[in-house]
Amino acid sequence: MTSEDRCCTSHIMPTYNRLPITFERGEGAWLLDENNNRYLDAISGIAVCNLGHAHPAIHKAICAQSEKLLHTSNIYKIDAQERLADKLTEKSGMDNVFFCNSGAEANEAAIKLARKFGHAKGVENPAIMVMEKSFHGRTLATLSATGNSKIQQGFAPLVEGFVRVPYNNIGAVEQAIEQNNNIVAILLEPIQGEGGVNIPAADYLNGIRSLCDRHELLMMLDEIQTGIGRTGKFLAFQHNHILPDVCTLAKALGNGVPIGACLARGKAAQLLTAGTHGSTFGGNPLACSAALAVLATLEKEHLVELARQKGQVICAGFVERLQGNKHIVDIRHKGLMIGIELDSPCAELVKSALQKHLLINVTNETTIRLLPPLIIDEQQIRQLVETLSTLINEFTA
Ligand SMILES: *Cc1c(COP(=O)(O)O)cnc(C)c1O
């Protein structure tokens, strides 16, 4: 049976337009198909496998934990969960953590927390400010928070209580606060991933922090894509020398083992109490031991600093090879979160790259998004830059 036959008779709900390829195993930044053909992975399972595939430290941690225990329950103390929370709060400057299994769930926790915060302040109908072009997940509340009508299409009635403003526009935030006296929190991505790798002004998050302080709002950062070293800091807000009140993580936290986390600080850390929120799997021993190994490996291999350096090398390479190409609108990056924006839709580049054994992604129709694993080496970086710039130059010619 060929893969095409399989796809016609699939019993999988068609929620994804899948590329016609299956990978059997991985080695660092390589993925290998059934015939042992190597593909260079410049997307990391969408910012998940930051340590690359089959990293021995993760493999070891998962094996060791599975020999002892996979799961108990959150009705007991879980040692690995306590240690992971210690490590995450130490590295982030936050106070405590709620563990769950995905990004959407982490944002659900943040949204519930913001509503409790509002009610505790005496706001009867609390609203959360969110951004245009944002992405926060696919559950009902998180798709309602998401700034993309395609994602909301067909799912009305949406969850209410969101006020939307343009991204990277402090004046719009100020105005919305003045016009809506029920706003209790602002939820945003430090860099918009799905929305097109949109990097705001260097002091944008500082501006949001000041407004949240002045108006007693919770600053809630969705670091699900930007977190865990991706941008050249452990968390992207650390570029701004500020602390949010709430911060959500998932994707790379387990390097492929599902885990999500909602971190809170100060008064926000006191709101979700016994009986108000929960999760069967959240923070179970297996997921937490994987995440502990991820954090230890990031430090041991200095991957966060390396992400900053490698991002610079990759972007300098693209700037050099794409200079003079009038169809390039912008090449932007923070660490290894990279966007190359063209002046027309370029989704077909994903397929032509696949033919050249390179895995990339296109977001917001015109932006090539690269999220290579932080362990990508020099030779692979050269291959990525050469292959992709040639493809782009051919595509735009
Ligand atoms: C991927 C992503 C999510 C959703 O995470 P899931 O694990 O797919 O639920 C939320 N926010 C951002 C910024 C993301 O990139």
Image (tube, rainbow, N blue to C red):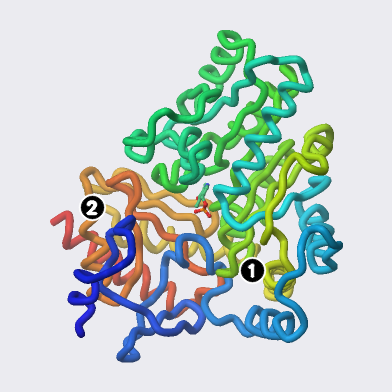
* Numbered disc 2: secondary structure: loop
Q: Residue at x 29, y 75 (%)?
A: 21
Q: Quadrant of residue 198?
A: top left
Residue 76: where, in percent of width, then height? 84, 62
Residue 362: where, in percent of width, then height? 32, 54
Q: Residue at x 46, y 47 (%)?
A: 193
Q: Amino acid at mark 2?
A: Cys
Give the CA separation, mark 2 to mark 1: 31 Å
Find residue 219 and name its label: none
Q: Quadrant of residue 274?
A: top right
Q: Earlier in the sequence, mark 2 or mark 1?
A: 1
Task: Relative to 223, say whether 121 is above or below.
Answer: above
- Comparing marks 2 and 1, which lies closer to the viewer? 2
Considering every residue shown, the one lying at the far left of the view is 397
Task: Relative to 313, say whether 301 is above or below.
Answer: below
Q: Residue at x 41, y 42 (%)?
A: 195
Q: Quadrant of residue 155?
A: top left
Left or right, 86 with respect to 129, comes to right
Label 1 CB less than 8 angstroms from ligand 1: no
Residue 17: where, in percent of width, then height? 27, 59
158 and 390: which is toward the camera: 158
Find residue 346 and name its label: 2
Label 2 CB less than 8 angstroms from ligand 1: no
266 and 347: which is toward the camera: 266
Residue 102: where, in percent of width, then height? 58, 55
Q: Residue at x 48, y 23 (%)?
A: 165
Q: Amino acid at mark 1?
A: Leu
Find residue 303 and name its label: 1
* Numbered disc 1: secondary structure: helix
270 and 7: which is toward the camera: 7
Task: Relative to 342, say whether 125 is above or below.
Answer: above
